[in-house]
Image (cartoon, rainbow, N blue to C red):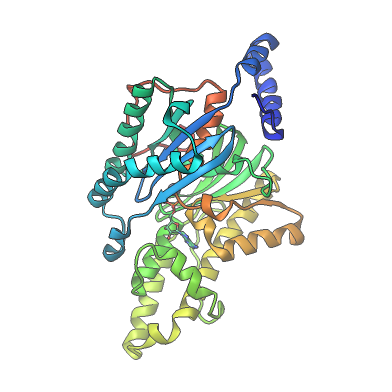
Amino acid sequence: MVKITNRTAIFFIRLITSTFVNGYTILTLYFKLMSIKDLYILGIESSCDDTSAAIIYNGKVLSNVVAGQKIHEAYGGVVPELASRAHQQNIVPVVHQALKVANINKNQLSAIAFTNGPGLMGSLLVGTSFAKSMALSLRIPLIAVNHMQAHILAHFIEDENQSVPPFPFICLTISGGHTQLVKVTNYFEFEILGETTDDAVGEAFDKTAKILGLPYPGGPLIDKYALLGNPKAFSFTKPKVGDLEFSFSGLKTGILYFIQKNIKENPQFIKQNLPDICASVQRTIVEILMEKIYNAVKQTGITHIAIAGGVSANSEIRKTLKATEQLHGWNTYIPKFEYTTDNAAMIGIVGYLKYLQNSFSNQSISARARLGIED
Ligand code: KG4
Ligand code: ZN
């Protein structure tokens, strides 16, 4: 049975507008509506060090299984060869588990969506080859998904407890590899307003953690220790870059020198001050991110603000952004915790949106380590 939810209705209202703009007739749209059936999309994510599979049913998440890779902890960062090997081991059981939790059979799948970039080539290749062969064997469509678009479009996963950002909105995309302020005008219309000139904010968290002797990924640990510390205990110099640009490599060096200097005077410095160091570093990073959002609001006049990507799991950025609703009357969109770090539900939802637009890929598609958000 076709179930038209509010989200689906909104999608079609938007589609009608773009259909007229594109010069199609109302008849085309009518046939499109009539051809909609129950859609089960298998999403596959393998761009970095998480192997994930999810089942999306008409925009809702039925399952979202993520297998992390503990192996990188000891190395202070992701080792590409080890990541690729772990994906190969994980992908079959993870997909199997996603189908099992969703309580469906692989023959019920309507399409397979997979991350084709950006990311680590060896990791991407595992998900790409798996998705291609599975789609071929089941004779169902294949849908290539841009990982960075997926982080943003995770906001369109159907969930009664989450509000959906209206177009246009601004999304601060913060992850281990990216830091971007993006203006989102439609599901697949993105404009980068500003981005980092060097390190991503996730790297700033992870490298600080490494300096402090914490394992990879350090972001969640800094968040955890920061809860116990004084955010004003230490201060760090903020970068001087353009209004909508970011830079974190100077901050990282500043933190390194600060720690080296203090350890020289007191070898127990980190041990005795860990919560205060974490809270102070986190406060500095969140202040930098918030300043950039203010600048983007000032320049565009858009006050619908979303965050996405692994670093959007950070409790301080979530709290500080939420507070702007009272302070400035903005509308903020904070993703559910499970859709912040890498996951296949976000790949599945993009697969669903692309399916509705008949945007499919063919078997000649390959993994792309470098892929811009506008691609
Ligand atoms: O989106 P993601 O899972 O992978 C990439 O596409 O890069 O982001 C991973 C990044 C890591 O740098 C990790 O330390 C950071 O997100 N992260 C956090 C938190 N949770 C994950 N950073 C700060 N606070 C957190 N709670
Ligand atoms: Zn990511």
Q: Position of residue 254 (x, y in %)?
A: 40, 71
> Which quarter of the image is occupied by the C terminus?
top left
Q: Is residue 367 visible?
A: no
Q: Residue at x 48, y 79 (%)?
A: 275
Q: Position of residue 203 (x, y in %)?
A: 40, 59
Q: Is residue 229 left or right of residue 112?
A: right
> Which quarter of the image is occupied by the N terminus?
top right
Q: Nearer the viewer, residue 301 or 161?
A: 161
Q: Position of residue 363 (x, y in %)?
A: 34, 22
| Quadrant of the rendered image containing residue 60 | top right
Q: Is residue 102 visible?
A: yes
Q: Nearer the viewer, residue 181 or 358?
A: 358
Q: Position of residue 87 (x, y in %)?
A: 30, 45
Please state the total of marks drawn on the protein image: 0
Q: Residue at x 58, y 55 (%)?
A: 292
Q: Residue at x 29, y 40 (%)?
A: 121
Q: Residue at x 50, y 51 (%)?
A: 309
209 in relation to 201, above or below: below
13 in relation to 48, above or below: above
103 in relation to 307, above or below: above
| Quadrant of the rendered image containing residue 21 | top right
Q: Nearer the viewer, residue 72 or 172?
A: 72
Ligand 1: quadrant of the figure:
bottom left
Q: Is residue 368 left or right of residue 350?
A: left
| Quadrant of the rendered image containing residue 105 | top left
